[in-house]
Amino acid sequence: MTFGGCPGSRQMNFDKAPVAGNESGKRSSQLRQWPVQLHLVSPQAPYFEKADVLLSADCVAFAVGDFHKDFLKGKRLAIACPKLDSNQDIYVEKLVSLMEDAKINTLTVAIMQVPCCSGLAHVAKTALERTSRKVPVKIVVVSLEGEILADEWL
């Protein structure tokens, strides 16, 4: 491993032996809508109505080997990067609209363990504070190697 700089952009090498597993057969994508980038998502899209929504930091899907099976299955998706995306006030407004207008059932926020990623959890918490509906919100924190470090309902 190499250390230095911000933990979110620090170079790290996870060289390890390939994990043996059942990799035979093709898995189907669990993605159920497009677009997925939160800046492009419309809370008024009919597929968000009364849906379970996954708000995922961009990197989570690459860290978690079974992202589609373990996180995305049965949910509508929005992705964002709290470090690189600008104008995150719009993210709060969109989440409030998803909660109030689309009347989503649940919101799962999947973030990486790096400090900058916690900004996405903050966006979700702020939206929850501003909405009149109390939507169940779960925050899942993923390690850089794809392990679940925390899984908590707010």
Image (tube, rainbow, N blue to C red):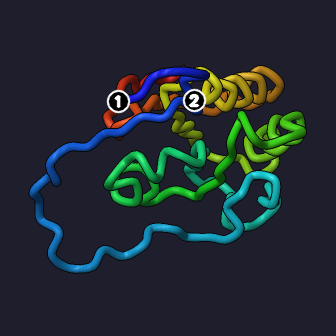
- Residue drawn 71% across and 67% down? 35
Of label 1 and label 2, which has the lower sequence position? 1
Q: Which amino acid type is shown beneath numbered disc 1?
A: Met
Task: Check disc 1 and report its element: helix, strand or loop.
Answer: loop
Closer-to-camera residue (8/134): 8
Residue placed under numbered mark 1 in the picture: 1
Q: Is residue 92 left or right of residue 64?
A: right
Residue 109 rendering spot, x and y as whole percentages: 56, 37
- Quarter containing the N terminus: top left
Circle on res. 8? 2
Q: Residues within 10 Å of mark 1 (few under 14, many from 20)?
A: few
Q: Residue furthest bottom?
A: 25
The number of numbered discs placed on residues in the rendered structure image is 2
Residue 57 rendering spot, x and y as whole percentages: 59, 42
Q: Which amino acid type is shown beneath numbered disc 2?
A: Gly
> Mark 1 or mark 2: which is in front?
1
- Residue drawn 59% across and 22% down? 5
- Residue drawn 84% across and 36% down? 88
Residue 10 rendering spot, x and y as whole percentages: 53, 29
Which quadrant of the figure has residue 46?
A: bottom right
- Residue drawn 51% across and 56% down? 75
- Using the numbered discs, state the Cα–Cα distance from disc 1 to disc 2 in whole angstroms: 14 Å
Q: Is residue 36 above or below residue 108?
A: below
Which quadrant of the figure has residue 8?
A: top right
Q: Is residue 144 above or below residue 65?
A: above
Task: Check disc 2 and report its element: helix, strand or loop.
Answer: loop
Circle on res. 115? none
- Quarter containing the C terminus: top right
Q: Is residue 43 left or right of residue 25?
A: right
Closer-to-camera residue (134/149): 149
